[in-house]
Amino acid sequence: MVSRDDRTKRKAPLDPFEHVSEVVFGVLMALSFTGALSVATAGREEVRTMMLTALGCNIAWGLTDAVMYLVGTATERERKVALLRRLAATKDAGEAHRMIAGELPERLAAGAGPAALEAMRQSLLAVPIPSANLGRDDFAAALGVFFLVVLATFPVVIPFVFLHETALALRVSNGLAVATLFVGGYMLGRHAEGNPWRFGLALAVIGAALVAAIVALGG
């Protein structure tokens, strides 16, 4: 649904969940390439090829994710604007209440009585119908998506730049990947107002399990 804040500004930059999601995607994508290295036979040329391939893949993924972010934002905004137009067009209060209830979370919709829904309807009718066009903040957020995915590559591949022993570089890379996931989980915990350490450890354990699977498959 469209809030009053939508009249004055577009969607804010990415929220913590979106930040963490993009970093996790980038880290796991990079791990899929480092895990393909054979510690027994990989030389510097193979390592260099892996790093360039991982970076190139995350650049492509970042571009795709940024474009899809804009598509999703435009689609959702158009849907909200269409709701405001339907509410403005209908004279049937009951139908308007059903439209509003359909946009609410299930539990809120179940607990919202006719009086509450009517108050929402009157409030929404007072909101000028905004433009559904994408704005500067939307493109800034899409650029943020791109950079988050690309930057997530570096904790995974940087050890291979400074450590010439492939096996050691791979273990350090895996450790940094898990640490990055822990930080991401910690941020999610704070955002959810839960226990950030529990969230961090949970995401790190999931990451460690994924790293172990990657290693077992050839890392």
Image: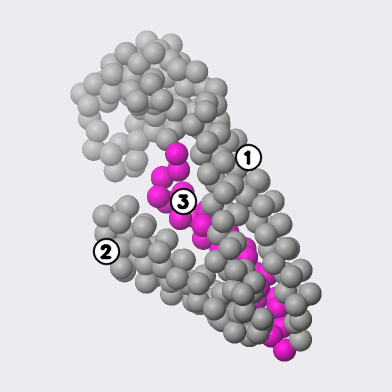
Q: Verify CB contact (< 8 Å) between mark 3 and mark 2.
A: no
List x then y, in percent, for residue 140. 52, 36
Amino acid type, label 3:
His
Compare marks 3 and 2 and give the one earlier in the sequence: 3
**On the rendered image, what quadrant is the C terminus found in?**
bottom right
Q: How many marks?
A: 3
Which stretch appears magenta?
Answer: 13-40
Q: Residue at x 65, y 84 (%)?
A: 165
**How is the rendered protein coloured?**
one colour
- The answer to which quarter of the image holds residue 118 is top left
Disc number placed over residue 97 in the picture, else none: none
List x then y, in percent, for residue 95. 37, 21
- The answer to which quarter of the image holds residue 218 is bottom right
Compare marks 1 and 3 and give the one earlier in the sequence: 3
Viewer-proximal residue among 198 and 97: 198
**On the rendered image, what quadrant is the N terminus found in?**
top left
Distance between the Cα atoms at labels 1 and 3? 16 Å
Viewer-proximal residue among 206 and 13: 13
Disc number placed over residue 19 in the picture, else none: 3
Q: From this view, report whether residue 81 is shown above or below residue 73.
A: above
- Badge 3 element: helix
Amino acid type, label 2:
Asn
Q: Residue at x 64, y 72 (%)?
A: 161
Determine which residue is flagged by label 2. 195
Viewer-proximal residue among 52 and 178: 52
Q: From this view, report whether residue 117 is shown above or below residue 71.
A: above
- Badge 1 element: helix
Determine which residue is flagged by label 1. 67
